Image: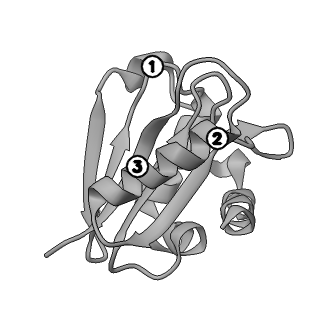
Amino acid sequence: MRTRLSAALLALPLAALPILPAAAQDAPSEVTRADGVEITLHRFGWLRGDDLAMLEAIARSAEARMMLLGPGGDFAALALAPAEGLLAGEGVSASAQAVAQLPDARTARDRALELCNGARRGGQPCVVVLEVAPLR
């Protein structure tokens, strides 16, 4: 799963993504419905511009979601450690953890948080920043 996360994020051209000003992060969450799924992006104030731009690209792109989470149809979540964010150096933060194809939203959130908290290097506990659920 870690390899899939890195490959998916690195395959998206960061230079082509807009860097959003801090004011654009005021909304606590944004819900998008497309391609048979509902994507919820939680816009925490600590998300850096490049992290937020990448999360928005994942939310908008079925191809990016497929690379990150595999085939749709079930529940998925992505958790990050606030002190580490999503992107780190040339890749993805070690604590960034995505899980997919789980039976319900709670299981997806709990598993992503468990993996993220196990990988973070300190600071505040991890939080879920992106959730995907099938439209039914």
| Quadrant of res 3 | bottom right
- Residue position marked by numbered label 3 in the rendering: 110
Residue at 45% of width from left, 72% of height from top?
Answer: 62
Foreground residue, 47 or 83? Answer: 83
Q: Position of residue 33 (x, y in %)?
A: 24, 63
Residue at 51% of width from left, 29% of height from top?
Answer: 20
- Do labels 2 and 3 touch, CB within 8 Å? no
Lateral position of residue 69 relative to residue 73, left or right: right
- Secondary structure under tag 3 reads helix
| Quadrant of res 104 | bottom left
Q: Position of residue 56 (x, y in %)?
A: 47, 48
- Residue position marked by numbered label 2 in the rendering: 118
Query: Of the residues tagged 1 and 3, which is closer to the observer?
Result: 3
**Figure check: 70 above or below 116:** below
Lateral position of residue 59 relative to residue 120, left or right: left
- Say which quadrant the N terminus sits in: bottom right
Residue at 68% of width from left, 69% of height from top?
Answer: 4
Label 2 – label 1 distance at C-alpha: 23 Å
Lateral position of residue 93 relative to residue 128, left or right: right
Q: Residue furthest right?
A: 90
Lateral position of residue 127 relative to residue 75, left or right: right
Rendered image coloring scheme: one colour
| Amino acid type indicated by mark 3 | Asp
Q: Residue furthest left?
A: 136
- Residue position marked by numbered label 1 in the rendering: 45
Foreground residue, 126 or 24? Answer: 126
